[in-house]
Image (spheres, rainbow, N blue to C red):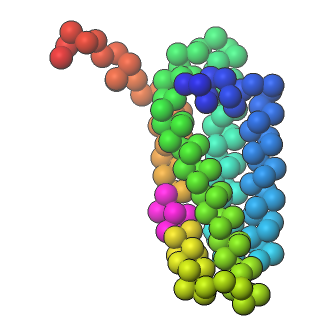
Amino acid sequence: MDLLGRKVMAAGGAALRALGAEIAATVTRARAAGVEGGWCDALSNAFAAVGSLTMELGALGLAGQVEQMMLHSADYLDLFSTMVIGWQWLAQAAAAREGLSAGRGDAGFLEGKLCAAQYWIATELPRIDALAALCRSGEGSYARMKPEWF
């Protein structure tokens, strides 16, 4: 609730814009290093999806629909953290590619970094779209629950 309700909305989304600039710089570095272009595209698309969803949810809050905005705040945290971890894996992939190209470091270790980055980007980043759809859906079965029902 704090991430969605305060952090990303503070100062007109300044922190989210700053994160976007960092992610864009990482994508540029990764492309220059020769990281798989699809990985770079996947992270860029994930950030765009998070940004779009954040604006939609923020608009709900500004319209006074705070409960609707916050209904899936835990899912928002999940998708946001998935994107941030993807960003960090892309940064590691860029460093690994740079190391391999320069002949620095243990090649096996660097290849392992690339495999781990590929795994996260291929299997975890796609979850962002499903989580964003859930955040937009307004599905509120758990919000209607009452403790006495258990």
* Range of residues picked out in magenta: 118-124
Answer with the quarter of the image where residue 23 lies. bottom right
Residue 106 showing in the rendered view: yes
Residue 103 placed where, x, y %? Answer: 72, 90
Q: Residue at x 66, y 83 (%)?
A: 105
Task: Report if residue 101 lies within the magenta region.
Answer: no
Q: Residue at x 52, y 16 (%)?
A: 67
Residue 98 placed where, x, y %? Answer: 74, 79
Q: Measured along the vertical axis of the image, is residue 15 above or below residue 33?
A: above
Q: Residue at x 53, y 78 (%)?
A: 112
Residue extending farthest to the left is 150
Residue 32 placed where, x, y %? Answer: 81, 75
Task: Report if residue 120 lies within the magenta region.
Answer: yes
Residue 35 placed where, x, y %? Answer: 69, 76
The quadrant of the picture occupied by the C terminus is top left
Residue extending farthest to the front is 105
Along the horizontal axis of the image, is 122 left or right of 141?
right
Along the horizontal axis of the image, is 145 left or right of 79?
left
